[in-house]
Amino acid sequence: MIPEIGHLALIIALCVALVQAIVPLAGASLGIQRWVNLAVPSALAQLLFVAISYACLTWAFLAHDFSVLYVAQNSNSELPLIYRISGVWGSHEGSLLLWALVLAGWAGAVAVFTPSVPRVMRARVLGVLGLVCVGFLLFIIITSNPFERLLPAAPEGSDLNPLLQDIGLAIHPPMLYLGYVGFSVAFAFAIAALISGQVDSAWARWARPWTNIAWMFLTLGIALGSWWAYYELGWGGWWFWDPVENASFMPWLIGTALMHSLAITEKRGTFKAWTALLAIFAFALSLLGTFLVRSGVLTSVHAFATDPERGVFILGFLVVVVGGSLALYAWRAPLLKSAAKTELLSRDGALLLNNVFLAVVTAAILLGTLYPIAIDAMGGKISVGPPYFNLMFFALTAPLGVLIGIGMLLRWKSDSIARLRGKLWLPAVLAVVGGFGLSLVQPQWHFAAAAGLVMALWIALTAGLALYDRVRGRALGSALRSTPAGFYGMLLGHVGVAVFIVGVTLTSLYTVERDLRMAPGDTYSVAGYEFTFRGVRQYDIHNYTATRGGFSVRSESGNYNIDLFPEKRIYRVQKMPMTEAAIDAGLTRDLFIALGEPLDSAGTWAVRVYYKPFIRWIWLGALIMGIGGIVAASDRRYRRLVRSRAGDAAANEAAS
Amino acid sequence: MTPARKKRLALVVLMVAGVSVGVSFALQSLNQNIMFFKTPSEVRAGEAPADRLFRVGGMVVAGSVSRPGDGLTVQFDLTDNEEQVTVKYTGILPDLFREGQGIIANGRLDARGDFVAEEVLAKHDENYMPPELAEMHKAREAQQ
């Protein structure tokens, strides 16, 4: 009964979404106030019905209702409670339902938290979000109904994919979706603005906090996925340039460009058309990501069960959304003339360059990701290796790193080289000296290490200088308090980049990886630590059997001792083996041990031992960036009510 | 030209130059890093590139996995149900590597015509068969 309620709620949600999509948009264009007023209640009703539907599916998991096909395929009576809750999004149908819930949630949030946005504008934004909802709900109902019954009911479920039985992966998809789908809000704002022809500072100010929050979730979602791959896949890598990773990274890059472009549009009223275009692309790339993951055109560890019919639907949806938006853009963009000129040597110019670099990096990654598919269509089979992506990414982001430092200290509108030179010589010298100095104390000297450390120091020092510039000559407390949250968010975001660079540089250059053949009692020395294998034992736990290896690790100086217990698990229902690495995590290094396979009957195992310096800094950097995003979104000026444009412009001048 | 126009022109030229440098750079680098996918039959027919990494995919022949020597070197045969290629790999195999399963290996051929793998990939799915092989099977079934 309850699954049918869930299905029914989904159909009602579709009907409500149709109302939400059509009536407010029509009302806004025809000037019918009552239709416009329908936007908020219909968005909230839509959220309610999707939430009911989602709750019904969760109930089916909790109650072990194996008469529901999806539950029978993805759960088991021995599955622990937390994974029954996260199992809802463990496979295709449920993850789409989660997607719809997140989308409805964002629309509900827009309905509630935008008191400063004029009603007509809000009605249009909600209308566009309604259209997107219609697309996704249709997709679920037509191709991927999660409530499909299995008759007769299965006596037992075939269990959740063991890879997904992990806390990191339990929260990775919701985070990622909150980010992906969050860009639909920026997209809806852009479309609404294109319809009305009003893309201005006020518009950018409405769209900015939403973009920041979506970006924050996407940042954390990607970082969680990377962290999960590191400890769960058992290879100790943190990024593979896997097509599905790229699918989430491309919207992130364009989203980053969008955040910066929105800053120019808000402060200076320029780059309006470009900003609107980026908002469209950020969402289009999110949809493309969904298409790539769900259609089966990709060979990837992520593309589990796939179905061509679904791929065709998403591709069609993608074409309609992108084609429609770009047509609207082509028609309306000429209206968006910029009010002011842009000097290259100004913060505006630096942000423009930032956008160019980010767009080019995205294009390069898109090329590498889609190229195999294009070749496939012509009958060839190829794949593009990580060296391509590494080269493109680092070659194109290195100038960006230099630019971050300069950009933070540039003035809006126009600046002078002399002033800039006076400010930047000191951090530049300190960064070069400090970076080279730090690279000399590493185990070996690499130019890349020096370059990475110089870059990280450069960004951190210029961020400090930007803050110092703000408070200099004023009472420290009041100066810090009067600095807007947006500024702190910007600093945190950039410091996060610096921390990330340190992590990536040191991890990639100084990781020590050893695949060893170890018999009980064997000791190997890796990177200053002695690893002693003490043999394996069997354990029966929950829904799996574990072979647990015992290792004693001691540093060569003898003052650090720890025992590590990596596992090889066999999940009983799916008979699927899983490697559970044992990691001794630390701020400056991780020690990582994973069991390979037994090599003989005497208890000898293939063992993987890694020493990973500063790898935590990669995710720490992402976390700091994410915090920066939320801090920036909390800026007071986003919550102020609408005022006259003239007043806004004056306030902007004062804030910058 | 007015100064404003000059500036705009400079900006446009700069952007076009940047983009074209980027694109040529990208295409060149892409060409160097493409890995071709070959089936064991194609490898046997001498279609594999001699001097660069490529991928070979197929099913691990049952009973073919052996560990010569006392290190971590493992050797097995890979088949597409027509021809076989011997694969050598030193290191730890992925969790889902098993006889009879589909896998993909990156590497190159040695002088004896054996495939020396740098990396062995197995899909995280019980019923995984490399998509290229799955297509071949489908095509063959359609023919019959």
Image: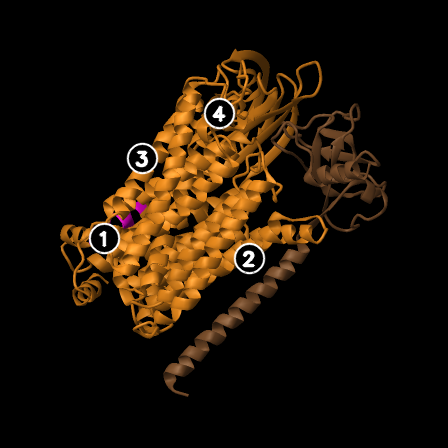
Q: Which residue is mark 4?
A: A558
**Disc 2 target residue:** A364
Give the class, few, some or many, for how many residues have Cα within 10 Å of label 2's Cα (few <14, many ≥20): many
Give the residues drawn in magenta, as a range.
Answer: A630-638
Given contact means CB atoms under 8 Å apart, are the residues at marks 2 and 4 in contact? no
Residue A338: x, y in percent? 33, 71
Q: Nearer the viewer, mark 2 or mark 4?
A: 2
Of pointers 4 and 3, the one earlier in the residue sequence: 3
Question: The numbered mark 4 sits on a residue in which chain?
Answer: A
Across and down, in percent, residue A369 comes to 58, 51
Query: Which residue is tagged 3?
Result: A48
Residue A373 lies within the magenta run: no
Marks 2 and 3: which is nearer the front? 3
Q: Residue at x 54, y 19 (%)?
A: A151
Q: CA distance from mark 2 to mark 4?
A: 48 Å
Q: Gap between marks 1 and 2, in whole Å?
A: 34 Å
Decide if residue B65 is on the left or right side of residue A70. right
Q: Check if mark 4's residue and mark 3's residue have beta carbons within 8 Å.
A: no
Q: Is residue B99 left or right of residue A210?
A: right
Give the Cα separation between the discs numbered 4 and 3: 60 Å
Task: Describe the colour scheme in one phrase.
Answer: by chain
Q: Secondary structure at mark 2?
A: helix
Rendered view: A626 above or below A277:
above
